[in-house]
Image: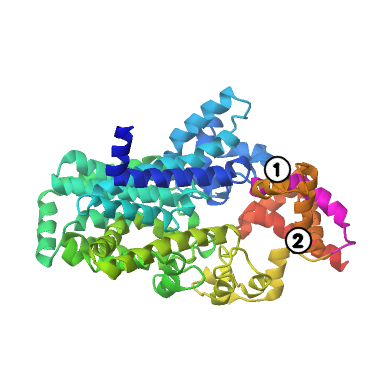
């Protein structure tokens, strides 16, 4: 018992890491998205993950198995067609490399349990969700090693808590854990540690490690190639230092070649894959329909401060990380140049991407990758605050704690759609500020980005109430209304099978009025949902669901929809929904 007490009193950083892991573990079990077929392997993750089942289960990297069973795999894998007519996975295979140990475990579990070993059943979804927890733990361990070079234990512990719980890294380690961001946070943190170790004692082994790790980081997100700046500029304090560093590598040019070889070696499987499906070693899958960079029109203000998706609006804690950069010349002079250079270039590159808001997501998610680096200047601010006396110390610490709590609240807002994934603006933000759920007016003031214009580097918002209502309510009333009883009966099985409603269901079951009657509890929740959205809304939802199910059952129709989706550069789900809505509108007019 004394040993345990001593451990808790001395191991401040370990306790902070343990606390973060427990919170994320609890969050994962609470939302339990792995219980839903579409709860984990969704959106971009479909592409990141597709390599593993294609290679190790179906032995078919050309994805012919998808065409042969389009009903099952049509919406699980979203490829595009190359000039050779073959299908290619849009994203690079870096994430599949990181998923692979957990995929192997899940595949083994599926074979010895009732779950189908098809790559998409519950064991695989569970493994993907918790793989992020493992990598996050690894990232926190190496972040502590880096910070220990410059700061004391309390500062390190607070910094780890703040970076993981006070930013959108928390969201992307839990609700959408298999997205790239938590993994890139870990890899870049590890790269910083390896860089630090290399410059402590340069060696062939360490430069090989840096090269290979930079290759893997870039294989996940090619724009992250700028991490190499950290390596080459590490501990540069002046122009004379820079000239010495340049001369150092001129005299050891073979080290650069070795590092480059390690970098390229990681990419060889990707080059081989692209060549097999497209006939090209380099194949830019994102080049369809104008997707690219507009370096002459960077949206720097928008990416940092806009209400739509501004990084510092939705992750205000990182204001202190940016401020801390300018404390580096006195505190850690050798890191001012590499961190400032990296961050400025990162902002410029990301703000030049045609979709500077990076699609749907909580906050500016692309910046999460660099949080391991930004933890260093953030720790400078924490260190400064902890060293102050009286009110200054408590003021700085209190502000940081409030911002951590605020991030947790905004995460819950995002979960409840009070912060929308890409429809936000100033009016919408303040309409739901400090409100857990969206108001009716919120849906009236949100705006939709003009994607067609954005692909040309033109940024404007569409504020047509009709268009928003069409997306929000999925069409208008087109036939005789269903009775409330019919809608209740339709909602009950959906509520019962969706883990999102389990908390409400348990609360109802414990209430005096229900007294443990599950059917009555389900009916009451269904009635509340009808009262909230109105009969018209659910009438349309049912109609649309029935129509989509009918369309999915028709092979020839689905083949036509898939071809249209590829032509329009949208997902099959989106094209299916679009066609179903059009049919409902047509029925209404007739």
Q: Is residue 579 above or below residue 455?
A: above
Q: Is residue 405 above or below residue 48?
A: below
Residues shaded magenta: 478-501
- In the rendered image, residue 371, in percent from the top left (x then y), is placed at 35, 56
The residue positioned 78% from the left and 52% from the top of the image is: 524
Q: Is residue 450 above or below residue 370?
A: below
Q: Would residue 54 be found to the left or right of residue 473 on screen?
A: left
Residue that numbered label 1 is attached to: 497
Q: Is residue 271 visible?
A: no
- In the rendered image, residue 121, in percent from the top left (x then y), is placed at 60, 35
Label annotation for residue 22: none
Colour basis = rainbow
- Which quadrant of the structure image shows residue 126? top right
Residue that numbered label 2 is attached to: 581
Q: Secondary structure at mark 1?
A: helix
Q: Quadrant location of the C terminus?
A: bottom right
């Amino acid at each position: 018992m004394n040993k345990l007490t001593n451990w808790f009193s001395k191991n401040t950083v370990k306790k902070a890491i343990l606390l973060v892991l427990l919170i994320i573990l609890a969050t994962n079990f609470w939302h339990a998205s792995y219980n839903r077929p579409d709860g984990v392997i969704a959106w971009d993750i479909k592409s990141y993950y597709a390599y593993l089942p294609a290679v190790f289960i179906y032995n078919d990297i050309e994805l012919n198995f998808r065409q042969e069973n389009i009903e099952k795999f049509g919406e699980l894998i979203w490829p595009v067609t190359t000039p050779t007519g073959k299908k290619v996975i849009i994203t690079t295979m870096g994430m599949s490399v990181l998923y692979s140990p957990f995929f192997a475990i899940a595949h083994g579990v599926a074979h010895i349990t009732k779950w189908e070993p098809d790559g998409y059943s519950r064991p695989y979804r569970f493994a993907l969700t918790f793989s992020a927890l493992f990598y996050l733990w690894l990232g926190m361990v190496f972040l502590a090693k880096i910070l220990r070079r410059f700061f004391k234990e309390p500062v390190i512990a607070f910094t780890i808590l703040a970076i993981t719980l006070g930013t959108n890294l928390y969201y992307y380690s839990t609700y959408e854990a298999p997205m790239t961001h938590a993994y890139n946070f870990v890899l870049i943190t590890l790269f910083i540690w390896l860089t630090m170790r290399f410059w402590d004692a340069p060696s062939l082994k360490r430069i090989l490690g840096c090269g290979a790790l930079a290759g893997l980081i870039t294989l996940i997100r090619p724009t992250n190639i700028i991490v190499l700046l950290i390596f080459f500029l590490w501990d540069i304090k002046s122009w004379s230092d820079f000239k010495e560093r340049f001369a150092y590598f001129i005299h050891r040019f073979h080290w650069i070649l070795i590092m480059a070889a390690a970098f390229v070696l990681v990419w060889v499987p990707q080059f081989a894959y692209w060549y097999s499906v497209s006939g090209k070693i380099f194949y830019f899958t994102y080049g369809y329909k104008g997707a690219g960079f507009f370096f002459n029109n960077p949206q720097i203000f928008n990416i940092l401060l806009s209400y739509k998706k501004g990084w510092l609006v939705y992750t205000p804690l990182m204001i202190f990380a940016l401020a801390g950069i300018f404390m580096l010349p006195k505190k850690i002079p050798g890191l001012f140049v590499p961190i400032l250079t990296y961050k400025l270039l990162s902002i410029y590159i990301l703000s030049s991407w045609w979709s500077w808001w990076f699609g749907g997501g909580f906050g500016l998610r692309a910046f999460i990758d660099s949080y391991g680096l930004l933890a260093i200047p953030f720790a400078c601010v924490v260190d400064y605050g902890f060293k102050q006396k009286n009110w200054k110390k408590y003021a700085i610490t209190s502000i940081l704690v409030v911002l951590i709590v605020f991030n947790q609240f905004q995460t819950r807002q995002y979960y409840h759609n009070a912060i929308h994934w890409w429809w936000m603006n100033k009016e919408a933000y303040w309409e739901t500020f400090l409100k857990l759920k969206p108001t009716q007016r919120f849906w009236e003031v949100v705006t939709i980005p003009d994607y067609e214009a954005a692909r040309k580097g033109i940024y404007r918002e569409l504020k047509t109430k009709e268009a928003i209502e069409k997306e929000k309510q999925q069409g208008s009333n087109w036939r005789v209304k269903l009775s409330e009883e019919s809608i209740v009966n339709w909602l009950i099985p959906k509520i019962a099978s969706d883990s999102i409603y389990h908390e409400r269901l348990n609360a109802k079951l414990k209430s005096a009025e229900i007294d443990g009657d599950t059917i009555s509890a389900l009916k009451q929740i269904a009635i509340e949902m009808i009262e909230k959205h109105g009969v018209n809304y659910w009438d349309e939802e049912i109609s649309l669901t029935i129509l989509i199910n009918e369309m999915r059952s028709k092979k020839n129709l689905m083949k036509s929809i898939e071809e249209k989706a590829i032509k329009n550069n949208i997902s099959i789900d989106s094209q299916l929904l679009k066609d179903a809505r059009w049919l409902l509108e047509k029925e209404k007019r007739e």
